[in-house]
Amino acid sequence: MALMHRMREAKKEADPIHENIRTIADLSKHAEHNISPQQRVIEKVTDFLGRPIFLFIILLVVTLWIAINILLTTLGLPNFDPPPFMWLVGVLSLGAVLQATMILITQNRQDATTERNRQLDLQISLLLDEKMSKLITMVDEMRLAHPTLKHSSDPQIEALKKTVDPHQSLETLNQLLEEEQK
């Protein structure tokens, strides 16, 4: 039993897909661990605000507010917010300000997470480019060592041996975009 468990664990450790999934989960767990309790509450509230049930609750409250005030006026009783329902407008305006603020706070954290992930993607892409260039160089060296392939050449291989310079790529992209705007 213990041997089978160790074999399964060894297989998991040797599985790069499993390791990548574990790494992604660890990164996500680390990012979630650094969230303040206030941020967690705001994000839970924002999550609720984005659900259809919240729309129905608002519609129900507004309808009841108006109906109760009109009914009280009709019965000749004092109402708490006569038409044009200034208190209702004030409450809804305050709710809108609070809701917009919470959405912006949540969006700011999501933007920071997206930017961090974008930077990580760029770093991984540059590392992969270096590795691929190295592999192409090694395969080309093997080709040159092979007696029947020694004198053949491929211009694409020479170009692919070079790693991407991100600064040069960005400069070229900016130049092309500027030319298109003219």
Image: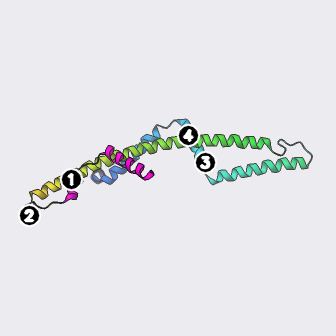
The residue located at (42%, 48%) in the rendering is 178
The residue located at (13%, 58%) in the rendering is 143
Instruction: Give the CA distance from mark 3 to mark 1.
Output: 50 Å
Q: Which mark is residue 148?
A: 2
Which amino acid, by three-letter code, is at mark 2?
A: Thr
102 shown above or below 56? above
Which segment did they paint magenta? 154-182
Q: Of callouts 3 and 4, which one flags the residue occurring earlier in the amino acid sequence? A: 3
Of badges 3 and 1, the one in the foreground is 1
Say whether residue 73 is magenta. Answer: no
From the image, tell me which residue sits under label 1. Answer: 135
The residue located at (49%, 38%) in the rendering is 35
Of badges 2 and 4, the one in the foreground is 2
From the image, tell me which residue sits under label 3. Answer: 48
Q: Which mark is residue 113?
A: none
**In the visual, does 117 lie left or right of 100?**
left
Q: Of callouts 1 and 4, which one flags the residue occurring earlier in the amino acid sequence? A: 4
How many neighbours does mark 4 have within 10 angstroms: few (below 14), some (14-19), or many (20 or more)?
A: some
Q: Of callouts 3 and 1, which one flags the residue occurring earlier in the amino acid sequence? A: 3
Q: Main secondary structure of the magenta part?
A: helix
